Image (spheres, rainbow, N blue to C red):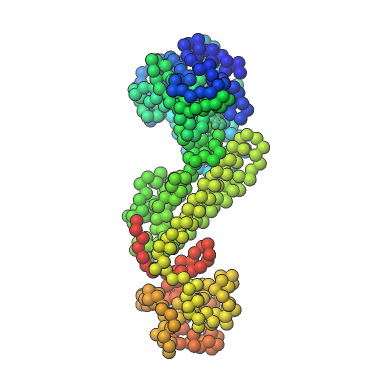
Amino acid sequence: MEKLEACIKWLRENDGFIDERVEFKYTTNTGISAHVKDSVATDQPLIRVPENLLITNEKAQEAFQLGTEVINTDHPNSLLQLYVAKLKFEEDAGSFFKPYIDLLPLQLEQPYFWDANDLQLLKGTDIYLVMKQHLPKLLQEWTSLLQKLKIAPSDDLAELHAPDADLFDYLQKCPPESPKVSWTSFSSYVWAAGIFASRAFPKIALTNRCLSINEAFLYPIVDLLNHNNDTKVKWYSENGQMCFVTQETLKSGNELFNNYGNKSNEDLLLSYGFVQDNNQYENSRLTLRLDEQLLSEAVLHGVALSDERVADNCVQFKLTKKCLLPENLVQLFAYLHKLKSEEAINLRNTLEGSDGLHSILMQKVEFFRNRSKIDASNKRRRTLRKYFDSQRKMFQAVVESLQKRQKEIVKSNSPFMTSFKTIYKSDKKFANSLLLVFGVTKFDDLIIKDCTRDALLLWIVRIANKESYPRKMEFEVPQFIYDTFQEVSSTIAVERNDVVEMMPFYKKMFPSLAEKIPEVFSEGNWGIRQFIVADTVLDRLVWTRKLTQEPFFIKKHPMAL
Ligand SMILES: C[S@@+](CC[C@H](N)C(=O)[O-])C[C@H]1O[C@@H](n2cnc3c(N)ncnc32)[C@H](O)[C@@H]1O
């Protein structure tokens, strides 16, 4: 509290202003926070900070006696971060910013600074991947800055840059709060980057003269306000002061929040180390590693992927509450399930693809469900559990949306689909024969006894023989099934292996079926080749709905892209 009071005093002594209704306090859950003592509904600034109290690139350049040329616009805050590390970790009691710098916490809650056990729990999430990719980039940024400034690092650079270097391990062995940390260490730079990620403001709020949209500055006192999504606030510069205005109406005792940007829990956890309950901005990502050529071909087949290509062999889809299921994700999965015999994305591969996507999404649901079972014995574990749980809910919502989408596709394309269940009900003679073949009295028994595929093969061959039965079938056979059989039969080259594979099934069925039920299984051609053809017909035409295990014959029908 002393440090907090000293910082407020420093602000006031330097012509800063804090509305008297605002008071700062410390809570175990959220650290320092601001509350109002009285009701507040005003468009006047509650906090004003003179611009000379802000920590900006200009201050950093002045301190290092450099011009803007040293600032790399790709990393517009690197010099500033090094400056803040210097202010924090170099013994310099005389610094003008000392009361503010003293207040900056050494222990940050971002996962970069977690111990190995907690970090382990993040493995398998996108957060872990992002951090693993970010740390070497940060190391590179810091190394080249020190080289440019001719500052000798206190760390062994060869060790840090070694191909097998584990930068998480380095941070655990050399955490910023350890007394031996020097301002020229990578640890202090990662800490400063953590400070910027969790409390810097965009420079564009202060001035139009920015080196890049990502240029930031530190805004003492206002950076003590905690975050709440959707809170309406304004920050602007007026008469040499940075003003903070809340547009919310607050009652006595309410917390005075800032808004760090409406962020997903993933972003919040990564940059700030906390998450929000029922976060309406929650989102997830589905990252897929796929062969580069396959991706290019998918694009040629009409799947728009330009925003999703994040690296070679890699696409990433953003799943948001507003758009749980991007259409191009469904299309990509259709393409991935396209058979060689199919020229384009069609109804069959779209349905098959949606089942493939369903399996992957369910793996995500299960992953996060298992992770959310961790014991929540401390604040960090509680945060983690909330994060896992909100990701599980998010993927669950995507699964539900996919199921709904699949239902819609089935409904709107029903003229192109014939359910085997309907066939079973219509082809009484065939259905009765199955009682003898498999001992089934109703369609669902086929599924329970796991003999749907065998029944489908028998029925497809029956249809191929439809002209050979003395009497016309009592129901309308979809012509495309018959035609596909003829087409496959006239083009297929049956190989020895196909015969070997089909033989056990064939021997199980024949000749006994032909003897027992000749009126169904002996008219026309029931040779083994017919079943090998039927097997291909089945692959090309039949989609089995995962949810119900109900097979459908699907007519070739293009899907609009
Ligand atoms: C800009 S600082 C705010 C001041 C901070 N409370 C402090 O003690 O210095 C951002 C940090 O505050 C904490 N924080 C901010 N908003 C929060 C919230 N809604 N719930 C929990 N922690 C929050 C997080 O640790 C975050 O990294």
Which residue is painted at 39% across and 55% down in the image? 331
Q: Please state the horizontal and vertical placement of residue 205, each as a whole percent of the image.
A: 39, 25
Q: Quadrant location of the C terminus?
A: bottom left
Which residue is painted at 50% across and 53% down in the image? 399
Q: Please state the horizontal and vertical placement of residue 222, each as a whole percent of the image.
A: 49, 22
Query: Where is 454 relative to 39, above or below?
Result: below
Q: Quadrant for ligand 1? A: top right
Which residue is painted at 57% across and 49% down in the image? 367
Query: Where is 100 relative to 494, above or below?
Result: above
Is residue 181 in sight in this rendering? no
Report whether 491 appears left or right of 31.
left
Report whether 392 appears left or right of 467.
right
Query: Where is 471 relative to 418, above or below?
Result: below
Q: Quadrant of residue 112?
A: top right
Q: Please state the horizontal and vertical placement of residue 3, each as a whole percent of the image.
A: 58, 17
Q: Quadrant location of the N terminus?
A: top right
Is residue 49 in sight in this rendering? yes
Could you say which is closer to the camera, residue 536 or residue 292?
536
